[in-house]
Image (cartoon, rainbow, N blue to C red):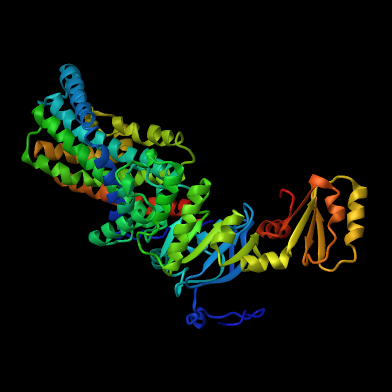
Amino acid sequence: MLPRPRRGQRYHLSQVKSVSAIIVARGLVKRYGNFTAVDGISFEVEEGEALGLLGPNGAGKTTTIRLICGLSPLTAGELLVDGLDVRRHARQVKGRLGIVPQHDNLDPELTVRQNLLAYSRYYDLPRPLAEARIREALALFQLLDYERQRIETLSVGLRRRLIIARALVNAPRILVLDEPTIGLDPQARRLTWEKLRQLQAQGTTLLLTTHYLEEAAHLCDRLLIIHQGRVLAEGRPAELVERYAGRRVIEVYSSNPDEEERIRRLLADRPGVEMERDSEALYIYLRRDDGLDLAPFHRLGQRVVLREANLEDVFLRLTGRGLR
Amino acid sequence: MATALAWPGISRRALRVWQRNRDVYLNTWRAELVWPLLEPALTLVALGLGLGEFVELGRPERYIDFVAPGLLAIFPMWAASSEAGWGAYFRMESQRTFDAILATPLDVDDITTGEVLWAATRSIISVAYILVVAAAFGAVASPLAVLALPFGLLPGLLFGAASLCYTAVARSVSSLNYFFALFITPQFWLSGAFFPLDQMPAWVRAVAWWSPAAHATDIYRGLLRGGLEASHLYDLLWLLVATALFHLLATNLLRRRLVR
């Protein structure tokens, strides 16, 4: 892989063609008037990998996805998808992607089958191939029984599955999913995860946005945490937890300043301890949890929660606890 | 952002959009079969036979024979404009169908051309219904009338593209009403569909020159009577130029709206 370009040094796109990455994004910028939605995002996605873009609402995740899919023209930056420059070959790029949008845009005037058939024609698939792919996609998402139903009659969960099935009609090498399980109940969410992992196991590259941290942890090999149009952190989920939240977290629900002061003094000389508070609680992040005397905490009773550090801690620490 | 008008890319991919709209139409056309026949029939009875009793055309012609080609200009205009007006707006804003299409190898130009082609198809379908009704009333004098079917494509393209221009800038469904009130409805009266323009004051004729429906009416009248003249070639040219201009404008306005 090429080293990251230094200041003022840029690679010509032809130089990165040999890279094994299936998506190469360098310095992506998207501005709408004075508003900068994406402010210099760079990353690569390896073939067969599942990369998640994680961030609060309005962080620039969806805009980044739109840029990659050639749906929105870049203000600046370089972008290669499957070896193609998205700025010049948006049509070919779109032909190789399966795009799952955040909002339901199934065709309510058509049946389930007609929806997929119309889609297969957009990709110019010959009819017999289209028929085979449609059966396969409907079978994978357990939708064959609904083939002749109109979209209005489907539940939210079924529609979401159908939107993903629709994105498979062109047998894409890369599946781009914007909040794939938004609005789904836990059963439907798990089924969707299972199917997506199945697709990944067959070699499909997954690029997804989510703000469900459980989804990010379950589905993604690697995460980019995005905030205000920039990448704040990048790594495997476990790495990120280790790096930004440590091992264990103690949450102390207390509004008594004396009590808090006591706790702070208690932990003052321990290495690898960080503390943060919001209006509700004091959060103590422990890089190491060996040999800590928990007795003073237990004395606080139910107002103390001791737990493993998780992605939510990473997310909240990096993007800020308060409402923005 | 000021950008020059870019020429629309016309590709056979537009047929994919057309096919999508055709599928929707075929899902419901039987349920909607009666009205497109009944509407021109009622109009012909009311105007041609009812009102016609009191109309002096100033020449030996039944009023119903005069009105029938007028209806060929009016109803298909309405069919094409509603499809590319309310229909396309609904597909774009409520159903997000255009977004779904743009996520595939199709682009805005394909959507524009596909929508305009579909609007023109609705125009031809409407022409077919009216021809059947007009023939039933004996208001079709010449076998040339069959040519009204292929000719119906042209005003259909024109009104489809013109309506799509407005759809592309409309901020709400109700704002589409302005387009229909200011552009489509006046053509009911300016087209010469219901009264002969040549007996109108010069200023009316001058305004009517700008009405696409007036040029379409001229040609339909020639076809149904079986009397085509050199002036019809001029009407044809007028419609072709206007269609090209509206299509150019529609493509650019829709690009501005959908590519952000």
> Where B252 sits versus A154, above or below?
below
Is A250 positioned to the left or the right of B140 in the image? Answer: right
Quadrant containing the N terminus of chain A is bottom right
Is A159 positioned to the left or the right of A58 in the image? Answer: left
Q: Nearer the viewer, residue A289 or A119?
A: A289
Q: Is residue B195 visible?
A: no
In terms of image quadrants, where is residue A264? bottom right
- The image position of residue B239, as x and y in percent, is 26, 47
Residue depicted at x 32% and y 46%? A145
- The image position of residue A268, as x and y in percent, is 90, 63
Residue depicted at x 41% and y 68%? A202
Is A99 positioned to the left or the right of A5 in the image? Answer: left
Is B157 positioned to the left or the right of A4 in the image? Answer: left
Q: How many marks?
A: 0
In terms of image quadrants, where is residue A306? bottom right
Residue depicted at x 49% and y 41%? B171
> Where B145 sits versus B45, above or below?
below
Q: Is residue B248 visible?
A: yes
Q: Nearer the viewer, residue B84 or B71?
A: B84
Residue depicted at x 49% and y 48%? A187
- The image position of residue B242, as x and y in percent, is 31, 48
- The image position of residue B127, as x and y in percent, is 19, 38
